[in-house]
């Protein structure tokens, strides 16, 4: 018996006796490989996507851009997926009615469709991105008849320090904002580059040493939201999170009063102690904050052993004057 005959004989025996155990195990493993990704997808469907559940006008506008971009791209992706399945089914080997045209190479309607629709979508997305980049710029002030709240945010190893210059208080690991009132964050870093991000409010922006940037946000409803650093910055990065408490005006004033009642004073000495690398730092409040503390951090004057690499640079919207100017 030659080799081809032996193979046919083995296949005939396999069909008569059924699949051997190792083939059954292979089939089961293939089935598991198909089921596991689907199971993971179902589990992820219960996740809480902060960016897609905004709690402020900036985040809501950014969500609209994301939803619109996904919808426009699905105009191309969805038909491609459907047509792939249709073509595979129509031109299967058993379909004798399908036309065989090996010399076919061009169709003007198909070319116009395949190139025209993506070009239009890209143009629409370009307009949306251009307008959104201007309207949702972190430096752009939020129009409101209410005077904004100014908060100075400092990225540290590995925690966030928030200073309220108008109230002479500060906090670590927690920031309170009044609902419906624009908030201007003046942001810098006392260490390496970090990223200031409150996903449910929107507008992530980088924090860099000896430089100041800004982020204009607003919370439209009460709640406790999660703030993070979205840029890896060392061993304690995973614990570099903070709570954002959006509360009513009365509760906000009460929070300020509680912070002002703290026995901890944030002067140069206390800041240098806080500046030492530490992670998972509990929420801490300070009173009697040095009014020039943020400016000294910005200029690098409170960082022993860290030479000032450059003069403090201000990145503002053009309406602020000086390194810590406030409207």
Image (tube, rainbow, N blue to C red):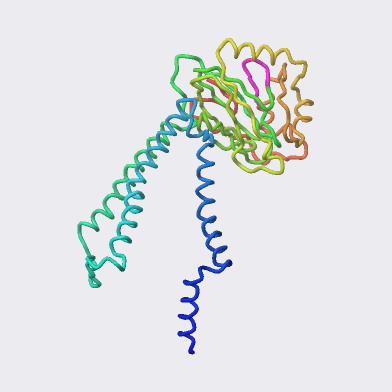
Q: Residue at x 45, y 14 (%)?
A: 145
Q: Position of residue 313 (x, y in %)?
A: 59, 35
Q: Is residue 211 above or below residue 285?
A: below
Judge by depth and name the residue closer to the eye, 24 or 69: 24
In magenta, the rendered stretch is 162-170
Residue drawn 48% across the image and 89% down it: 2
Q: Residue shown at 36%/50% (left/top)?
A: 77
Q: Can you tell which quarter of the image residue 252 is in?
A: top right
> Number of numbered discs present?
0
Is 50 left, or right, of 166 in this rendering? left
Provide residue 155's location: percent of width, then percent of height.
65, 33
Question: Which of the pair 3/98 is nearer the observer?
Answer: 3
Q: Residue furthest front?
A: 16
Residue furthest left in the image: 108
Is residue 229 covered in magenta?
A: no
Residue 99 location, x and y as percent? 22, 67
- Specify the farthest residue to the bottom: 1
Relative to 19, 168 lies left or right: right
User: Is residue 124 positioned above or below 188 on the image?
Assistant: below
Q: Nearer the viewer, residue 217 or 319?
A: 217
Picture coordinates of residue 78 (x, y %)?
35, 49
Whether the magenta-drawn stretch holds residue 168 is answered as yes
Q: Quadrant of residue 104?
A: bottom left
């Amino acid at each position: 018996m030659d080799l081809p005959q032996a193979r046919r004989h083995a296949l005939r025996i396999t069909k008569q006796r059924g699949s051997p155990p190792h083939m059954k195990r292979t089939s089961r493993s293939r089935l598991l490989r198909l089921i596991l990704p689907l199971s993971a997808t179902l589990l992820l469907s219960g996740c809480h996507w902060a960016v897609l559940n905004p709690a402020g006008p900036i985040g809501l506008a950014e969500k609209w851009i994301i939803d619109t971009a996904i919808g426009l791209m699905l105009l191309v992706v969805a038909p491609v997926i459907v047509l792939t399945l249709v073509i595979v089914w129509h031109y299967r080997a058993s379909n004798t009615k399908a036309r065989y045209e090996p010399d076919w190479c061009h169709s003007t309607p198909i070319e116009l469709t395949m190139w025209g629709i993506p070009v239009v979508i890209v143009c629409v997305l370009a307009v949306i991105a251009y307008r959104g980049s201007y309207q949702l710029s972190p430096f752009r002030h939020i129009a409101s008849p209410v005077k904004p709240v100014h908060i100075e945010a400092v990225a540290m190893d590995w925690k966030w320090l928030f200073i309220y210059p108008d109230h002479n208080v500060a906090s670590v690991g927690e920031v309170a904002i009044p609902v419906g009132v624009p908030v201007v964050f003046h942001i810098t870093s006392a260490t390496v580059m970090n990223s200031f991000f409150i996903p449910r409010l929107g507008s992530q922006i980088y924090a860099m040493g000896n430089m100041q940037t800004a982020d204009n946000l607003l919370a439209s409803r009460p709640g406790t939201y999660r703030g993070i650093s979205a840029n890896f910055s060392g061993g304690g990065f995973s614990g570099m999170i903070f709570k954002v408490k959006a509360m009513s005006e009365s509760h906000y004033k009460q929070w300020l009063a509680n912070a002002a009642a703290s026995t901890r004073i944030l002067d140069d000495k206390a800041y240098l102690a806080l500046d030492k690398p530490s992670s998972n730092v509990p929420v801490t409040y300070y009173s009697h904050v040095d009014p020039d503390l943020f400016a000294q951090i910005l200029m690098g004057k409170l960082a022993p052993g860290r030479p000032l690499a450059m003069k403090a640079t201000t990145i503002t919207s053009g309406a602020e004057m000086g390194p810590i100017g406030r409207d």
